[in-house]
Amino acid sequence: MTPVRRIGVFGGTFDPIHRGHLDIGCAAERALGLTRMLVIPGGVPPHRAQPVASGYHRFAMVALSVAGRPGWRASDLELRAGGRSYTSATLEELRGRGYASTELFFVIGADAFADIEAWKNYPGILDHAHFAVVSRPGCSVSQLPERLPTLARRMVRPPIDPATTPNPSIILIDAPTADVSSTVVRERRALGQSIAGLVGPSVEQHIEQHELYTAAPDDREPSPAAGRLNGQG
Ligand code: ATP
Ligand code: MG
């Protein structure tokens, strides 16, 4: 029998990718036995500010981070599409690209999942893939059944048993991740402080070499008025 392929789909702004992102990816990979992890830098949710670094730099930092991690891939799917990038469209696109017979797990932090009701195509988006939700410092997955009571019956804990798991389901993974955010990395850079340990060494070097997050105008993506807008949700 062919083993089931379990693909992690990890979307985010990654402005920049940091230790917490790598931890959540590893936690989902371990808990679910994922065979591949697609890390997809995209745009910004409609309700948040635009990325500071360009899509090119954000992709480069994701590519540096997946180097040497077997099964992990940097995906340019959302950046190539341009415009707003919606998770529901991304998942549909992946199904059309040969992932139809695989199990897709959208990897997401508990803080982001807590806002899922505001996402485009909610609640239908939850039928596009399993959602692998991982605790973030200050936002445990244990709070989610109470926070999202209408979804509580779909929430399960790993390990996943295909015979008993509602399909697709919301898998709650309680694992420690680094208490880091991209916001803190950007703020520390703007203040001229070290970001060692918050991001991987290659990403730290990339940020320093290209002088990212120092508030230089060249680091910024075009404004919506300039005609290009990314979004996620
Ligand atoms: P920002 O501060 O710019 O919002 P961020 O650190 O929250 O950045 P995002 O790119 O917004 O990073 O997050 C992408 C995904 O990674 C989201 O699902 C988010 O919940 C998750 N995530 C980010 N940091 C962590 C962390 N430290 N632990 C667990 N999940 C995280
Ligand atoms: Mg965030």
Image (cartoon, helix red, strand yellow):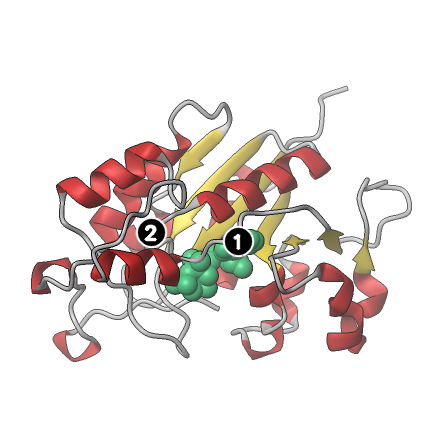
Q: Which residue sits at x=86%, y=40%?
A: 161
Q: Mark 2: which secondary structure? A: loop
> Dot 1 corresponds to which residue?
179
Q: Which residue sits at x=73%, y=76%?
A: 147
Determine whether the beta carbon of the residue marked 1 sits less than 8 angstroms from the nearest atom of ligand 1: yes
> Dot 2 corresponds to which residue?
16
Quadrant where the image shows the N terminus: top right
Q: Which residue sits at x=28%, y=48%?
A: 194
Specify the label residue 107 is tagged with.
none
Give the number of callouts.
Answer: 2
Q: Could you tell whether 108 is left or right of 186 in the image?
A: right
Q: Could you tell whether 197 is left or right of 10 in the image?
A: left
Determine whether the beta carbon of the residue marked 2 sits less than 8 angstroms from the nearest atom of ligand 1: no
Q: Quadrant of residue 215?
A: bottom left
Q: Amino acid at mark 1?
A: Asp
Residue 142 image point, x, y percent: 77, 62
Q: Mark 1: which secondary structure? A: loop
Measured in 3D between alpha carbons, the distance from the residue under mark 2 to the one under mark 1, in whole angstroms, is: 15 Å
Q: Residue furthest top?
A: 1
| Res 152 visible | yes
Residue 72 image point, x, y percent: 47, 32
Q: Amino acid at mark 2?
A: Pro
